[in-house]
Amino acid sequence: MSEMSDGLWSIGELAERAGATVKTVRYHSDRGLLPEAGRSSGGHRRYGPEALDRLRLIRSLRVLDLPVPEVERALEGDELLEEVVAGQLRELRSRLTALRWREASLRLLQDCPAGERAERLRLIGAMSVPPDTTAFARFWRRILPLRLPRRVVSAVLDSVVPQPPEEPSPAQVLDFARLHALVSDPRVHRPGSRPAPPLPDGQYRPAVLYDGLAEAYARAAAEVRAGRAPQDGGPWTVSSRPTPTRGGEGLPGVPAAARPAAGPGRRARDQALLEARGRSVRPDEPVPGALHHHLSVALHVQVEAEAG
């Protein structure tokens, strides 16, 4: 290896020391990423140890598959390097989640009976993978009362809109596909499907109602976590128990006025909501469907006891 008396290297010598090609060194040098230490008498670029360190860093970043523009940002300082790495990790997690959803979807098709494969394929094909929860949120926004404060709407959506897990099972893929099909059904959003106010205009305060529902759900969750059955009475008293919804169906996990008439369609949607929500959160955390059931049974038990 030749080296000039000034201790600097030519492009070829720098490439050899770094284990790179001359073409790679010239490319990065032309983009201004390698500091020049000087020029030879013939006008050729000369490089020192700083350029070698910079070239090794560039190669390390490229080995991690960072695009050249991101490499250039990362070279501007430690803070930007940290930002670039964090961004790449987020992108990688997103790609891995998409791959896991594809894998679970394929396993769902592979493991199901041949007679069910076409229907499952139709369900999967109707949603994105991983699923976009926009349709779920839109469904709830259409059935929530008008003029609800933003904080209440956000709290309801956070509670009832299931978040896709990063590592889904085939059963979770099927749950989300069924739920997506149900909330996307145009018959669910027919004109006039928004529930009518249960009280005359001016007397109905939906924010108060939904704040009360949140409190009731929190109290029911404590009962469920403690393993107490709804038949045990729960935390209700005559003065504090919520007023049943129209139709006497008790507290809604899915609002009664937003549901279709009782029957297989309603049961299917309730089950899908429960399963998709239940499998996407911590297994020890009660889900809205389970809390609805607990509250409804407890309330009916108490009403029957008082009537009898």
Image (tube, rainbow, N blue to C red):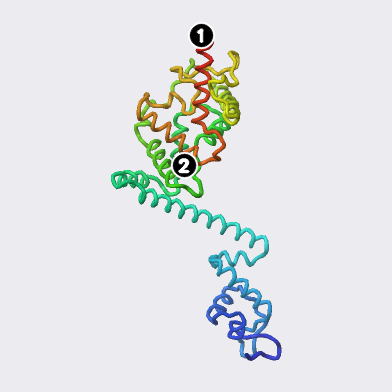
Disc 1 packing (10 Å; few <14; some 14–19; many ≥20): few
Asked which quadrant contains residue 225, the reply is top right
Q: Is residue 172 above or below residue 297?
A: below
In percent of width and height, residue 151 lies at: 58, 32
In percent of width and height, residue 118 lies at: 30, 46
In percent of width and height, residue 132 lies at: 45, 45
Q: Residue furthest top?
A: 308
In percent of width and height, residue 98 lies at: 46, 53
Q: Residue furthest left?
A: 115
**Which residue is at 53% across, 57% downward?**
92
The mark found on residue 133 in the picture is 2
Residue kind at label 1, given as amino acid type: Ala
**Which residue is at 66% across, 75% downward?**
53
Disc 2 packing (10 Å; few <14; some 14–19; many ≥20): some
Question: Of 7 and 36, which appears nearest the observer?
Answer: 7
User: Quadrant of the image for the N terminus?
Assistant: bottom right
Q: Is residue 21 above or below residue 158?
A: below
| Earlier sequence position, callout 2 versus callout 1 | 2
Determine whether the residue tagged by mark 1 lies in a helix, strand or loop: helix
The mark found on residue 307 in the picture is 1
